[in-house]
Image (tube, grey):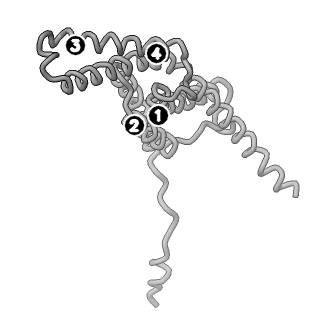
Amino acid sequence: MDDRSHRAAPGPAPAPAPGVTSRAGVLGTALAAVLAFSLSSGSWQWFSTYLGLTLLAVVLSSTRPPARATDAGSGYARSLAAYTLVIGLCVALALAPAMQRWAWLFPMPGTRRDCPRLGDYARLQAQASLGDLAARDGAALAAAQGEQARHAVADCLSATTTLWLPVYALAAALLAALAVRLLDRGGRRGPSRSVEG
């Protein structure tokens, strides 16, 4: 008798190759580092938020947080530091444009007060560069002045944002490390309770 039903029964899903998830995590880390370096010059744009969230999704979906059960001693500390620092970098990439634009997220009162002065200076520069032509078309002059002022203020704010971004990245990494430790501790307690019950 041909037991086709037995042969057609699905077996367990094949386990992924040992290096696949770690390679995806390393790729996400490398991309995050390269993008952080390339985007840190000039004004932070909202595309940085998309990139940061995308890389964060890649890292979280392709790598598992380190567990004390599998890593011991200094190996666990190194794995935890690497994992959470990458998460912090991705969060910083995602937050940078909002930090530049929203005072409640990143106050920097001195910079937010002084940067508009650079905008006023950029307006004067735009008018001076046009010389006698400025009197011919007031609307064009106003548009040029507004554009130059916006760029000057945005560049001024983004420069300060870039300087403080590592602090936010480190804070996000510390929060991620705390979350991983709490989840790891909760995961180790869970099975012991079920055995006792």
Could you tell me which secondary element the residue under label 2 belongs to?
helix
User: Callout 1: 10 Å neighbours few (<14), some, many (20+)?
Assistant: many
The residue tagged 3 is 127
**Outermost residue toward the bottom in this view:** 1
The residue tagged 4 is 160
Tell me which label, 1 or 4, sits earlier in the chain. Answer: 1
Amino acid on which the number 2 mark rests in the picture: Leu
Left or right side of 186 for 29: left
Tell me which label, 1 or 2, sits earlier in the chain. Answer: 2
Residue depicted at 20% across the width and 9% down the height: 128
Q: Nearer the viewer, mark 4 or mark 3?
A: 3
Instruction: Tell me residue 189's x, y (percent).
Output: 79, 45
Amino acid on which the number 3 mark rests in the picture: Gln
* Marks 4 and 3, how far apart at CA: 27 Å
The residue tagged 2 is 51
User: Callout 3: 10 Å neighbours few (<14), some, many (20+)?
Assistant: some
Q: Nearer the viewer, mark 1 or mark 4?
A: 4
Residue depicted at 46% across the width and 78% down the height: 7
Instruction: Tell me residue 10's x, y (percent).
Output: 49, 72
Q: Are marks 4 and 3 in contact (CB under 8 Å)?
A: no
Q: Nearer the viewer, mark 4 or mark 2?
A: 4
* Marks 1 and 4, how far apart at CA: 16 Å
Residue depicted at 36% across the width and 28% down the height: 35
Tell me which label, 3 or 2, sits earlier in the chain. Answer: 2
